[in-house]
Image (tube, helix red, strand yellow):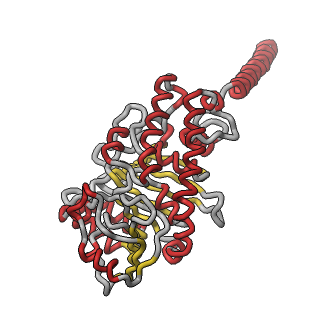
Amino acid sequence: MTIQKNYFSKNAIILIFFILFLFSSNICRSESAAGESSPQPGGPSGPQADYQRYADLIAGVRSSHGAFASFERRPAWAEFAKFFDQSWNKHEKKQLAPMKEWAAHELADPISSGLSVFYPFSGPDFINPFTLFPNARTYILTALEPIGDIPRFETMTEKDFNLFFAELRQSLHDLLSFDYFISAHMHAAMESEELKGVLPIILFFMARERLRILDVDYWFMEPDGTIRKVPALDGHEPDSGAAIPGVRILFENPDSPGNRSRTLYYFRLNLYNGSFPKKVHFISFLKNLGPFITFMKSASYVMFDPRLGAARDFVLDQSRYVLQEDSGIPFRYFDPSVWALQFYGTYAKPISIFKEDYQADLAESYQAGRNIRRLPFGIGYHFRPGTANLLLASKK
């Protein structure tokens, strides 16, 4: 018995030492491997850093952490970064800086309200509402363009890598040149295999504005109102099924007092009467985020169509402020007994493709010359300074 007991004791000790040896060896190998390779999504640097580095690479912003240094050395990226360093600086001076200065003075009440910004027919245009309303806690963008993916540069061929940045540059051309996305160009870009949707463009704007991206989730609202969330770096955009497809981005503005977390939602949503009123669960979700500052530009005058009456009534009912140019809600729907109206710029007529949507009553208000203030920048379809108009409607 004694011999048998000692035998098991010695073997137990040997076994324990052997297990400890294997365990410590695996730890060393893991730490060594981690030190030799770039951080992967969800790795030691955490998902926040991963989303930030993807956004920086998409935007042509050189990253301080160097995790994607090999991609930054590729000629296609270097050329893209150089081009947008120059064109973005030009866009800031010509467009964004005048907008910021004007908004600080003319939109002081909406900005200080902290209300959510609702932007129907937005496409991926995050930069305009953020420039005009930089203190909003929540931005809700809706349009028909697909959501798309965060591009996984690690698995791309060099050809696909080059095509991605060529497609992105082409997609951004219209906005930087004319301050709006041309629908035909946008739809063609969204159908390309490389770009696929709005998400890369939204991340481009955020990174160019030096915002800190905390998290990105696909955010699907099921017919019963429940939310299905999928981390955007887990793979390609999942099938939405019967759900309303969306994406939620959490971010911070390091330059903002208090540096609070903000939220951007983008939903792929049909606002026509045959669809929107049936989305009762989604309408309830939107109301919980209201009341709104609703912003509309380059909206193709679709709110003039009776088939969007439900969406138009929703905006008028749920908004405390509406800021729009003449392609938004027809002027006749702003009852002066309900809304205080402030006019900016000049109104002559729509661009030729929308000439049927001329508003005689709006023109009469401008021709009367009362309560008209200067607009020092172009916006929407009238992108040249001195040709554009804006209406700020404030609910009494």
Q: Is residue 315 left or right of residue 28?
A: left
Residue 271, image x and y in percent?
Answer: 27, 58
Which quadrant of the figure has residue 199? top left
From the image, which quarter does the N terminus lie in?
Answer: top right
Residue 377, image x and y in percent?
Answer: 48, 64
Residue shown at 63% from the left, 36% from the top: 43
Residue 16, image x and y in percent?
Answer: 75, 22
Residue shown at 47% from the left, 39% from the top: 169
Q: Is residue 47 visible?
A: no
Q: Is residue 382 visible?
A: yes
Residue shown at 47% from the left, 55% from the top: 126
Looking at this view, name the residue that lies furthest to the bottom. 337
Camera-side residue of 263 and 144: 144
Q: How many marks?
A: 0
Q: Is residue 363 left or right of residue 161?
A: left
Residue 103, image x and y in percent?
Answer: 52, 70
Name above or below for residue 202 compared with residue 41: below
Camera-side residue of 79 and 355: 355
From the image, which quarter does the C terminus lie in?
Answer: bottom left
Name above or below for residue 336 compared with residue 1: below
Residue shown at 56% from the left, 71% from the top: 104
